[in-house]
Image (cartoon, grey):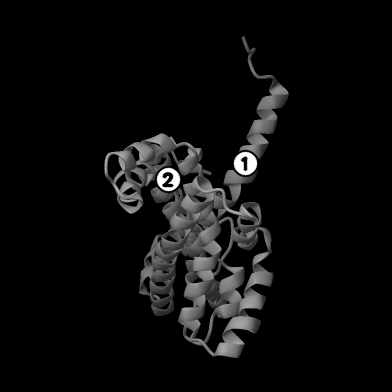
C-alpha cells in the first residue's frame, strides 16, 4: 500500500507541471493582449488577435499548404510504410535489421542535416519545384513513424489468423485486405495521426526547402515575426497547440494512442 505523497514530492510535481504547462499559459494570455505588441503579462484582454489570425492572407495560404503536406504526405508514407512493415514482420528478410535502421534514419538524424542534404542533392541537381520537394521531404520524414507504429500492430496480431484465411481459399493479397488490414486499422489510424502532427509542425526541413511564396505555416510564422511583432503569432500558436492537443486526446480516447507510441 502506498503512502500519501510527501511535501517534497508534491513540490516537485508542481514544478514539473509548471515547467510543462507554463509556456502554453503564457502564449495563450499573450495572444489575448489588448495591446499592439507581443508582451507578457498582457496589456489588457481582447480577442482581436485571435480573430485577426483568420484574416492574414499569408497564414491562410501557408495553412492550406501545411494541411496538404500533412494529409497527403502521411497518406503517401502509409502507402509505403504498411507494406514495408508487413514484409519486415511476416517474412525472414535478409538484412531486415539494416532496413529498419535505414528507415529510422530521418528520426535519428537531425532535421537540419536532412533538410540541407535534400536541398543539396535533390532540389539543386534536379530542379524540382518547391512544393514537390516539400511533399517528398515530409513523406520521408513521416515514413519511419508509419513503419514503426504499423509494425507494433502487426506484432500483436496472430499470424495464424491470416494463415487460416489462406487455407480457406483466400490469396495472400485477399487475406491481407480482408483479415490483416481490418485488424490493424487502429494502428494505421494512430500512425496517420502521429504522422499528421509531425508533418504539420515540421520546421528544420521545411526551412531549407521553402521558397518565395511557398512556405509552410511554421515557417510563415517565423517570417511574420521578422517584420511584425504583434500578438497574432501568439494567438495562432495557441490555436495550433489546442488543435494538436485535441487530435492527440481524441486519438487516445478512441484508439488507445499510447499503445502504439
Q: Residue at x 44, y 67 (%)?
A: 73
Point out the residue furthest to the right here: 8
Q: The residue tagged with tag 2: helix, strand or loop? A: helix
Residue 114 on image: x %, y %: 64, 71
Q: Which residue is drawn at 50% across and 40% down?
A: 155
Q: Residue at x 32, y 44 (%)?
A: 182
Alpha carbon of mark 2 to alpha carbon of mark 1: how far? 32 Å
Residue 254 on image: x %, y %: 36, 39
Seen in the picture, residue 127 relative to 86 is either above or below; the reply is below
Front residue of 80 and 94: 94
Of discs 2 and 1, which sits in the foreground?
Answer: 2
Answer with left or right where residue 27 lies relative to residue 181.
right
Residue 240 on image: x %, y %: 46, 59
Dividing the picture into quarters, in which one does residue 8 lie? top right
Answer with left or right where residue 42 lies relative to residue 61.
right
Residue 96 on image: x %, y %: 61, 53
Q: Mark 2 highlights which residue?
A: 187
Q: Mark 1 highlights which residue?
A: 18
Q: Please tell me how many numbered marks the rendered image carries.
A: 2
Amino acid at each position: 500500500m502506498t503512502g500519501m505523497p510527501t511535501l517534497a514530492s508534491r513540490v516537485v510535481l508542481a514544478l514539473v507541471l509548471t515547467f510543462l504547462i507554463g509556456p502554453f499559459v503564457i502564449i495563450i494570455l499573450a495572444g489575448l493582449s489588448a495591446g499592439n505588441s507581443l508582451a507578457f503579462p498582457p496589456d489588457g484582454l481582447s480577442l482581436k488577435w485571435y480573430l485577426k489570425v483568420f484574416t492574414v492572407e499569408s497564414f491562410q495560404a501557408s495553412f492550406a499548404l501545411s494541411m496538404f503536406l500533412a494529409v497527403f504526405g502521411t497518406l503517401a508514407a502509409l502507402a509505403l510504410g504498411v507494406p514495408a512493415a508487413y514484409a519486415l514482420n511476416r517474412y525472414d528478410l535478409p538484412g531486415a535489421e539494416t532496413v529498419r535502421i535505414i528507415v529510422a534514419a530521418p528520426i535519428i538524424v537531425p532535421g537540419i542535416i536532412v533538410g540541407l542534404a535534400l536541398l543539396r542533392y535533390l532540389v539543386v541537381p534536379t530542379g524540382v519545384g518547391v512544393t514537390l520537394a516539400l511533399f517528398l521531404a515530409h513523406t520521408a520524414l513521416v515514413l519511419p513513424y508509419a513503419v514503426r507504429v504499423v509494425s507494433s500492430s502487426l506484432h500483436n496480431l496472430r499470424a495464424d489468423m491470416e494463415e487460416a484465411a489462406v487455407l480457406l481459399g483466400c490469396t495472400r493479397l485477399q487475406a491481407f485486405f480482408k483479415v490483416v488490414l481490418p485488424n490493424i486499422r487502429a494502428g494505421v489510424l494512430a500512425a496517420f495521426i502521429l504522422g499528421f502532427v509531425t508533418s504539420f509542425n515540421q520546421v528544420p526541413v521545411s526551412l531549407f526547402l521553402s521558397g518565395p511564396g511557398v512556405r509552410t505555416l511554421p515557417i510563415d510564422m517565423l517570417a511574420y515575426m521578422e517584420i511584425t511583432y504583434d500578438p497574432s503569432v501568439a494567438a495562432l500558436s495557441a490555436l495550433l497547440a489546442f488543435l494538436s492537443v485535441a487530435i492527440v486526446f481524441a486519438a487516445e480516447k478512441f484508439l488507445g494512442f499510447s499503445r502504439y507510441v
